[in-house]
Image (tube, grey):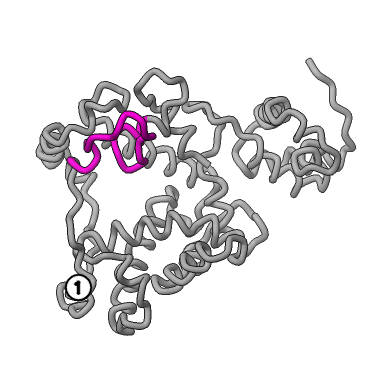
Amino acid sequence: MLEVRVSPEEKAAFLEVCRAAGRSASSVIRDAMRAYASFGPMARRPRSTLMIASAFAGASLGAFFLIQISQSAEAGEPDRLYGMRTFNAYAVSGVYDHELTLDEYLLRSATVRETFEQMQVDRAEQGMLPAHDRETLPGRMGAIFGLLFIPAGMDPQAFEADLDRVTPDCWSAMDEVRNRALEYRFSGWDHDQDGTVTAREFSDSRLNQLRRSFAMQDADGDGVVSASDFEPALWEERDRRRPETSSSRDARPSFRLPETACVAEREWAAREESFSPGHFVRAVPNDAPPPFDSAAGQIAARDRDGDGVVSFAEYIVFISD
């Protein structure tokens, strides 16, 4: 037992924020203690962010930020919230009211062209973009590539090199398809279909997404990701089995650019080479660190205990926010 003295107002505000975030007060305090111990001298530096948050300064707002700072990364922890930095970056209009509306989500997702422009700014000078844009930018770009560019056979780098060459009609067509996909995704997060997504709903959806993503990479289904999971033949066999094991309830609509959209862009921005699993198993010199876009690099980046394979817990730690 550890007794902590706070004012009744601080206690009430802290408990209310924990309740709204879907976490127990005990779990937040335990995580705060772990984080404080792990950060070492930085945590003890006067006026440090963690010191201020750990002192519960600012009552409800301070307590909420503490939740974000101190969550442990243990997979399967029942009261852990996943993806909260991303959630908070979208749900900003209510000053972290723990609820996300569709209007907020669409607004903070920006247009396809705005996302490209933000990517250019972010590369040129870090820090110029608002915090919520910096937080969501990698995910937005990845979704745009996977949703629009890869199926259409277009190279996003060609677009980035000359944004003004892309016609307004092409930008508009991409925004239309992407917004429909965003609305569908939001509906999937909104489990009770009340028009708002809570932190808990977002977290549960995020965890399910992580499990699906890990299962796709674990091609042989042995519970870990290893070098053998990147063998092209195994990927092809997994892709052949997928339609047979998918049920109608798991079917998702396809969001793709119409063939009549971006016709000129498909020609001058065509991808020179298509993705294949063989790309990941290419040989890497013994005296060089493996690149991230290789099987060895993917495993090395995620393998925290050095046993040569990546467990789901390690995967969670690597990509969780």
Asked if residue 253 is positioned above or below residue 240 in the image, the reply reads below
Between 321 and 265, the residue placed more toward the observer is 265
Residue 173 lies, in percent from the top left, at 29, 76
| Snapshot quadrant of residue 221 | top left
Q: Which residue lies under the disc numbered 1?
A: 266
119 left or right, relative to 131 = left
What is the span of residues highlighted in magenta in the rendered image? 278-299
Q: Is residue 45 visible?
A: yes
288 left or right, relative to 256 = right
Residue at point 64%, 61% (across, down): 94
| Snapshot quadrant of residue 142 | bottom left
Amino acid at pointer 1: Arg
Residue at point 15%, 36% (across, down): 232
Judged from this view, the residue extending furthest toward the front is 287
Q: Is residue 104 visible?
A: no
Q: Residues within 10 Å of mark 1 (few under 14, many from 20)?
A: some
Residue at point 28%, 35% (across, down): 284
Of helix, strand and loop, which one carries label 1? Answer: helix
Residue 4 lies, in percent from the top left, at 85, 26
Between 22 and 45, the residue placed more toward the observer is 45
Residue 144 lies, in percent from the top left, at 34, 62
Residue at point 39%, 34% (across, down): 289
51 left or right, relative to 65 = right
| Snapshot quadrant of residue 277 | top left
Q: Quadrant of the N terminus?
A: top right
Between 277 and 214, the residue placed more toward the observer is 277
